[in-house]
Amino acid sequence: MGEGSTETPQGVGHGQGGHVPVLLKEAIDFLAVRRGGTYIDATVGLGGHSLEIAKRLGAPGHLIGLDKDPKALEIARERLESVVGRRSLVVGQEQDQQLDWPTVELRHGSFADLANDERRTTKDKIDGILADIGVSSLQFGDPARGFSFQAEGPLDMRMNPMSELTAEQVVNQIDERELADLIYEFGEERRSRRIARAIVRSRPILTTAQLAAVISTAARSMKHERIHPATRTFQALRIFVNRELDDLRKLLEAAPQLLKPGGRLVVISFHSLEDRIVKDAMREGAKEGQYKLLTKKPVTASEEEIDRNPRARSAKMRAAERV
């Protein structure tokens, strides 16, 4: 969730096609897709960026797409199949290369798995990695997933439904001090202690609407704020439940080992915590001679794109090239 905005999904918006990836042209331009190369879409989502990469790859190119959310992965698979063709999509160990289209391999898992993936045989052979960090409209739009405070739903917030930890467990089981710390650290919420105290006193809290009401009572919106008082707390819980920042750090740590010389890393983030991690990792890599920075400042969406897709307002993209 971008700062200074209302609660909205990251990474995609709703256009006529129902799925509008943020900074699509800019991301693909910086990725500089090489025909026949090997690319990783670390957050395949609903397949918007993957489709554009696949169009440019051609045979014998190879696209690996990962996502924590099996539902998103299934939608992406169907979308790619409709354009790329069934025969070029890898299912399990079976593959049949279709002329003029790359092999597209979709995997259920976190991009953090790239660092220790035993199945990976492409070390030092990756031409580019794209990561669009954040929550998709599919996740935000389903009240049963528990990501949004704008609709009644269970306190879940798991991107991977098979993960053990839920937001309900965090809200109802950890002690007040730890809860306040995580709301402050991952939500950058200055009123974290007041909010944590109110949550603990209101236990058990079982739904998104109930939690939003408790937070709103404890920390009313200030006049200068344009966001709902629950925005930062919901962000903090989501990041904590899904280990989002830990996973991002693992991806950035693995990227220099995965990329071949001239390979590119492109990351789109949606709030300052993520952007700071990406910026620091790329700058440190440049100091160590691993990267050439391609973006001195983050690339942001044009006013035209923001008008078309308000969710693009908080997006920041950074890119680097392996040297």
Image: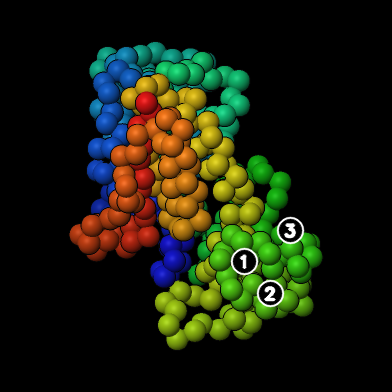
Q: CA distance from mark 2 to mark 1?
A: 8 Å
Q: Amino acid at mark 3?
A: Gln
**Mark toward the viewer: 2 or 3:** 2
Lower sequence index among marks 2 and 1:
1
Q: Are marks 2 and 1 in contact (CB under 8 Å)?
A: yes
Q: Position of residue 216 (x, y in %)?
A: 58, 80
Q: Amino acid at mark 1?
A: Tyr
Q: Position of residue 124 (x, y in %)?
A: 45, 18
In depth, the one of 223 and 228 nearer the eye is 223
Residue 309 in view in this figure: yes
In depth, the one of 70 and 176 nearer the eye is 176
Residue 282 placement: quadrant: top left
Q: Position of residue 292 (x, y in %)?
A: 35, 34
Residue 73 in view in this figure: no
Task: In the rendered structure, find residue 27 and report the number of the disc placed on it.
Answer: none
* Mark 3, secondary structure of its residue: helix
Q: Are marks 2 and 3 in contact (CB under 8 Å)?
A: no
Task: In the rendered structure, find residue 193 and report the number of the disc placed on it.
Answer: 2
Residue at the spot of label 1: 184
